[in-house]
Image (cartoon, rainbow, N blue to C red):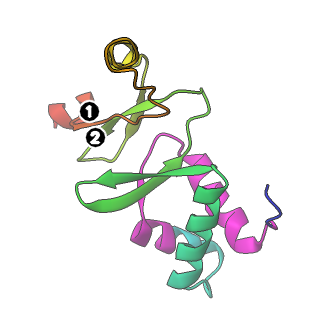
């Protein structure tokens, strides 16, 4: 996409993200997994290629309690996330909690929201049980 080549590093990163679509990955984890496939890969190569995948809209960046984490982008259109702060699982929220607010903003203030993002941090059912 957008004139970028599918380099070995990008192919590895895409494999990491596509094999666990609902999990958030912090950079050290991505680096460690990538090194199992390409031992010579550098940390800076990981950073540069994450930025390329972000620009292309393939992955998304999430703020996980002050730490950057990445996941495969949700392609169901408008998507919000329920994020477990313990296991880093990221589940899509099946409805938009801001639809009514957007309608009110247009009607009352004449403000047209172009986009928004909702990330709800908490504990998933499995982590709450443990």
What residue is drawn where x is 56% and y is 36%?
Answer: 74
Instruction: Give the image quarter of residue 119.
Output: top left
Residue range of the region highlighted in magenta in the rendering: 5-32
- Most common SS among magenta residues: helix
Pick the front one: 129 or 60: 60
- Look at mark 1 in the image and give the residue it sits on: 124
State whether residue 35 appears in this view.
Answer: no
Pick the front one: 87 or 85: 85
Callout 2: helix, strand or loop? strand
For residue 84, which numbered disc appears in the image?
2
Q: Badge 2, how many Cα within 10 Å: few under 14, some, many 20+?
A: many
* Residue 21 is a magenta residue: yes
Q: Where 59 sits versus 74, above or below?
A: below
State whether residue 94 appears in this view.
Answer: yes
* Residue 11 is a magenta residue: yes
What residue is drawn where x is 59% and y is 48%?
Answer: 19
Tell me if label 2 and label 1 are in contact, CB under 8 Å: yes
Q: Where 106 sits versus 87, above or below?
A: above
Where is residue 51 drawn, in percent x and y? 57, 66
Indicate the quadrant containing the C terminus: top left, top right, bottom left or bottom right: top left
Q: Decide if residue 46 is on the left or right side of residue 106.
A: right
Where is residue 27 drawn, in percent x and y? 43, 68
Q: CA distance from mark 2 to mark 1?
A: 5 Å
Where is residue 17 drawn, in percent x and y? 57, 52
What residue is drawn where x is 40% and y is 26%?
Answer: 111
For residue 104, which numbered disc appears in the image?
none
Where is residue 107 drawn, in percent x and y? 38, 11
- For marks 2 and 1, the one nearer the N-term is 2
């Amino acid at each position: 996409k957008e004139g970028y080549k599918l380099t070995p590093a990008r192919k590895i990163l895409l494999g990491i993200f596509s094999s666990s679509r609902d999990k958030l990955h912090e950079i050290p984890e991505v680096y460690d997994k990538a090194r199992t496939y390409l031992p010579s890969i550098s940390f800076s190569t990981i950073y540069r290629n994450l930025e390329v995948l972000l620009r292309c809209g393939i992955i998304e960046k999430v703020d996980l309690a002050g730490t950057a984490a990445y996941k495969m982008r949700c392609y169901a259109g408008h998507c919000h996330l329920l994020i477990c702060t313990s296991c880093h699982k990221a589940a899509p929220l099946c409805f938009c909690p801001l639809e009514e607010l957007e309608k009110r903003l247009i009607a009352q203030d004449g403000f047209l929201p172009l986009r928004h993002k909702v990330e709800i941090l908490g504990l998933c059912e499995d982590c709450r049980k443990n």
